[in-house]
Image (cartoon, helix red, strand yellow):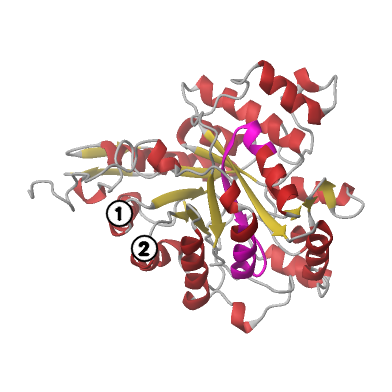
Amino acid sequence: MGSDSLACSGLTEFRNFPFHESIQVKLKENRSMIPIRTSERKAEVAWFSALCSDDYEFLGVPEGGLRSSYENCGNIVRLADSHGFQNILLPSGWIAGQDALTFAAAMAPQTQQINQLVALRMGEVWPPMLARAIATVDHIAQGRLCINIISSDLPGLKESNEIRYNRSSEIIQILQQMWRADGPFEWKGSFYNFSLPSTEPAQPYQQNGGPLLYFGGISPAAQDLCAKHCDVFLMWPETEDCILATMLSLSQQAASYGRQIDFGFRSHVIVRETEKEARAAAERLISKLDLAKGQEIKNRSQDSQSAGVLRQDELRSKSKDLYIEDHLWSGVGLARSGCGSAIVGDPDQVLAKLNRYMDMGMRAFILSGYPHATECDWFARYVLPRIPTCRLNELQCRLVPRPVTPLTTAVRR
């Protein structure tokens, strides 16, 4: 699949009949059509905290009260925690706001049950020290930590996909091996060469492989990286046939490496008591948007020209009313890179859309809305209690009772 192409591969067996029937019919015929790691029909439902200047009442109109301050971002995390969301994404970028890992360390003692999904751009920190920093926060959070692997350009530096993804692959392997190793550790690679007398400083609170690694990217190099090394593949909003095609392809790639992964869906959401009210809220969100200002904001992101963003842009350009399919509205992408669409509708319609994704094999949702605290309230009131939920790191035995680590009860050396 070409990085800039909208064409969806992997759908050969479905092309002879309408897609909305294909999901239901094929899943009934063969429930293992898309092999996934978490077979139980539950989903980890996460919210989003706007650490990178991405909180608005009117999209593209910056407001002082919604800046990415510690106060505003912290309020979103505490609110999502109190509402019962199982996770929250903390993004990373070279934009005025909060450093994700530092912020997660500060928030961990202030929350009761929520995991934090921390976005980390590979290459910014010397890998042994990155492993130690992650282990530190994992202990502070008592295992309520996940990592979102980012491979976009480092701030101020442009590199090829090959360099970025090869470096990310090397760093991921270093982290995973250090989290499992006991004793001396040596690494000789293309980007890093070092020898350590001990891996004790890198030992995380979570066991059986350490924190789960989430990853998103639609290019062939990105998908191969996830298939080889990561645990959850995150997808931005596209039409359901494109999503299913990617899931089929990536599950096959993972199987070629002797692995299974889970799939997650990153989307905005606008839910109101009626569909009419939800659609009006969507229109209100972009009612003051200057398209040139929106493009300027969008271009600030280091992933604004990524394959996934360009595919969403193409889908939006082909829509007549910004809806790329039923209840999936692409207006957010007019002023935002990354995730550019929202599920829009009344509670039953939003739930039905999420259920369709779960039937396809989605086991994680990362949702958001504008303003993030306000939309968090709406979704928690109308939809969240109706979804069968889980924490993936608990299901996959990463979070175990009373782990023995150098910072808990292991014998001091």
Which residue is label 2 attached to? 108
Quadrant position of residue 289: bottom right
**Residue at image point 61% right, 67% down:** 372
Residue 242's spot in the image, x, y percent? 74, 35
- Name the element at disc 2: helix
Outermost residue toward the right in this view: 320
**Residue 192 versus residue 124 in the image, above or below:** above
- Name the element at disc 1: loop
**Residue 18 versus residue 275 in the image, above or below:** above
Residue 302 visible, this angle: no
Residue 331's spot in the image, x, y percent? 79, 59
Closer-to-camera residue (374/139): 374
The three-letter code of the residue at mark 2 reads Ala
Circle number at residue 142? 1
**Residue at image point 63% right, 53% down:** 383
The region drawn magenta spans 356-379
**Residue 68 versus residue 259 in the image, above or below:** below
